[in-house]
Structures are given as structure tokens and as C-alpha cells.
Amino acid sequence: MATKSFNAFEMAQAQFDQTAKQLGLDQATCELLRQPLREYSFAIPVRMDNGTTQVFRGFRVQHNDARGPGKGGIRFHPMETLDTVRALSMWMTWKCSVVDIPLGGSKGGVICDPHNLSGREQEQICRGWVRQLAQDIGPDRDVPAPDVMTNAQHMLWMLDEYETIRGARFPGLITGKPVGMGGSLGRTEATGYGVVFTVREALREMNIKPADTIASVQGFGNVAQYAIQLYTQLGGKVIAISYWDQKEQTPRTLRKKDGIDLGALLQITDRFGGVDKDKATDLGYEVLPGEAWIEQEVDILFPSAMENQITASNVNKISKRVKIIAEGANGPTTPDADIEIHKRGIFMLPDLLANAGGVTCSYFEQVQSNINYFWEKDEVLGKLDTKMTSAYLRVSELARKKKLYMRDAAYTIAVDRVAKACRDRGWV
Ligand code: GLU
């Protein structure tokens, strides 16, 4: 099969168009929803540690806020593009809608590589990003959060800059803050755990015990690490993970057939999820090419790294044993690969549902920040489980009833709710 490279935004629009057609949405609603409401692209000049000034490019795209203030992370990535951010902002709208939280969809990014930036330089990027957007984000407008290569410290610098400009405290401006500084317990775990809550429900419906399954994971960042933790706690065994080898600029897979040891691997992993290859070899891991994660003979695949990873050129490498694909990342499967997966009858847990745990917990963080009363971790994770499980059940019920692919069922529910909100407001 020929490989086609996909522009993430075109991919998101195509997914939307298909759902819009199924739902019979009118032309104005389609036009409104297939593009962002607002977008910002700006320069962030930063005085570097060596005295020179470097100008970074920053973005924020607000796709839709009919159901509530925009919500979505900020990525720091050297390959970031405005189109990717557009796609991700649209996906946030559907994600918040499918789990039925009162928020819209936004996304932000900066073209930069934090591997090569000092803490002070990263702080300047965070503060510069907020200075450009201080009038256009806010607790009731658009609420940022962490994503690829951003973390709680970045969020706190951003919050501090915003509060300095506004001259008051606004803890609801941003989520993913450090615990003790307005952050919620469980937020760090939430995306990975949420993925596993949906896997657990899918396995329950298939009558398979998690302890009878094995898995392979793409990525070893925040989402992957906590997905592995909970999946292992439920009895599952992860035999492979992959990561980006920054030194040699290549992806790698690490495999241990009797199951990886998460704790031991974390000790040789940097803050971006990069593993020390030589130490991993000493610990008995096989070092394989980056794409090897996808061809493992496992029951579950967890693509939990970036978009555009399962493509027409590697989808045929997926083992016959694979029953479930749980998308921890946003947009990891290209549309042509998705068609193959559907044809093969692999059960798809689509990104907008599977990885919605992060934003759901962000919503809980906002609620706690707004009332200035913080819940125990068990309470947060219990509420997260309830929300994710009921969203899963709703999607799987529709999929069964209408014989839909899970991705199509999730889209149908999500888009329908947003379209209704636009109509109810009198926008269309
Ligand atoms: N970055 C996460 C996502 O893609 C979380 C967003 C948020 O918490 O607002 O869903």
C-alpha cells in the first residue's frame, strides 16, 4: 500500500466532514465547526544564556467554546506547526464533549526543543507566550495545560506571568499546576490512568482478564508511564516500550519478553522520557529499531507518543494477536491505517475517548481551584474513573446499536453535542 503523508488538520477536517455527513449537519454548522473560531501566531523573543536573542514562534488556536471556555495543552516541540495545533484544538473540542465536561477546545504550541534550552530560557518562553496572549486567555475564556514536553513548572511560570500582568490571583487560568500551588492530586497520573480505565472496560466487554493480556507501548513519557503503571497493577504485562533517543536522533524500542520493570526503567529515564540505552542493555533489555513496538505479538497496543505513527506503511506489521489499540496520543493513526484496522476487526479505543482522562482531571483541578478546596487523591481518581467509564459505556453502546466503529461512535456523540450547543446559542 502506498504511503501518504497526512497533514493533521486535513485529517481532523476529514474526520469531522464524515461525521457531519452522518449527522446531516447543515452547511453553516459544518462551516463553523470545520475550522477554528480564533487563532493566534506570534513571535517570542528570548534573551538566551549566551547573551544572544533568539526568536521563537508561538501559537494558540481556539477551535470552539460553545460548550464552555476553551481548554487544551501547550506543546513545546521543534516540529510544531500551526496546522498541527489547529488539528489538536479541534480534537480537544470533541474530547471535552465526548466525556461531557463543560469546556471547549483549544491548543497551543511553541516551536522549540526544551532538550537544548536551560530552565531560565524555558521560563522566558513561558512568560513570553503569556504576555502575547494575556488578553485572550483566562479562567472564563481559554485555559491552557501541559502537553508534549511541558510540565507543572512551565504552567506555574505561565500562571505567575498572567497574575503579574493582571495584578490578582487567577488559579483557574491554567491546569496541571504543581500540587500545593493550585494543582490537583492525580493530575499527573490522569491521562495514562484514563487510557487504562477504557482498556479495562473494553476487556470486560470482551470477557478477557487484564492478567491474561500483554501489551506494547509506543512512547515513554507521562502518558505511557502511568498507563503502564495502572495496566501492570491490573495484572497486565508490558513487553516493549519505545522512546526518542535524543543523542542519536532516532526512535528506539526496548523489549523484555518476561515483562518490563517500570520502576527500574524510570531510574534510567530523563524527564522527557528518553532512556539510557546502555544501562537498559545492562538491565537485560533488547534494543530494537524504533518501529519494532508495533510488530510485537501482543493483545494490546498503546500508541502513546505523537500523531501520525500508525500509517499505511506499518499497519500491516500489526500482529494478528492484537485485539485492542488504545490511543494514548492525539491522532496517532492516519485515516488510511484506520480503515485497515477497522477492516481487521481490531477494537479501537480512539484518542478523543481513550486519552480524555487528562482534560477531565484538569476540569476537576479548575473546580477545586475555583472553590479553593482540594480533594484527596482517591476522590479525584474515583471521580475520574466514573467519568471515563460512563463516557466509554455511552460510546460502546452507540457503537453496538448502530454497528459503528468506536471512533465513529465517539465522533457522533461529540460532534452532535457541540453542534447542539452552537444551535442553542443561536450561532447557526
Ligand atoms: N494535553 C492534554 C490533552 O491533550 C490535556 C489538556 C488539558 O488538560 O487541558 O488532552
Image (tube, rainbow, N blue to C red):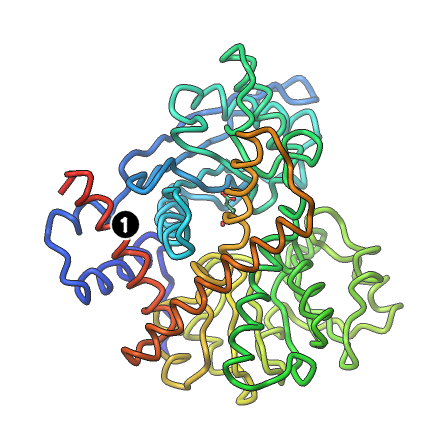
Secondary element type, mark 1? helix
Q: Residues within 10 Å of mark 1 (few under 14, many from 20)?
A: many
- Residue 36: percent from left, percent from top: 28, 41
Q: Is residue 4 left or right of residue 75?
A: left
Q: Residue at x 65, y 57 (%)?
A: 244
Asked if the residue at label 1 sits under 8 Å from ligand 1, the reply is no
- Residue 413: percent from left, percent from top: 31, 61
The amino acid sitting under disc 1 is Val
- Which of the 4 image quadrants contains residue 146? top right
- Residue 395: percent from left, percent from top: 38, 68
- Give whichever of 81, 153 is nearer the camera: 153
- Give whichever of 290, 177 is nearer the camera: 177
Q: Residue at x 72, y 76 (%)?
A: 235
Position of the C terminus, as image quadrant, is: top left
- Give whichever of 299, 381 is nearer the camera: 381
Q: Is residue 121 above or below residue 263?
A: above
- Which of the 4 image quadrants contains residue 125? top right
Q: Is residue 179 above or below residue 319?
A: above
Q: Is residue 111 left or right of residue 411?
A: right
Q: Residue at x 36, y 64 (%)?
A: 410
- Give whichever of 264, 336 is nearer the camera: 264
- Residue 317: percent from left, percent from top: 52, 82
Q: Is residue 167 left or right of residue 397?
A: right
Q: Residue at x 65, y 82 (%)?
A: 213
Residue under numbered circle 1: 418
Query: Residue extending furthest right?
Result: 282
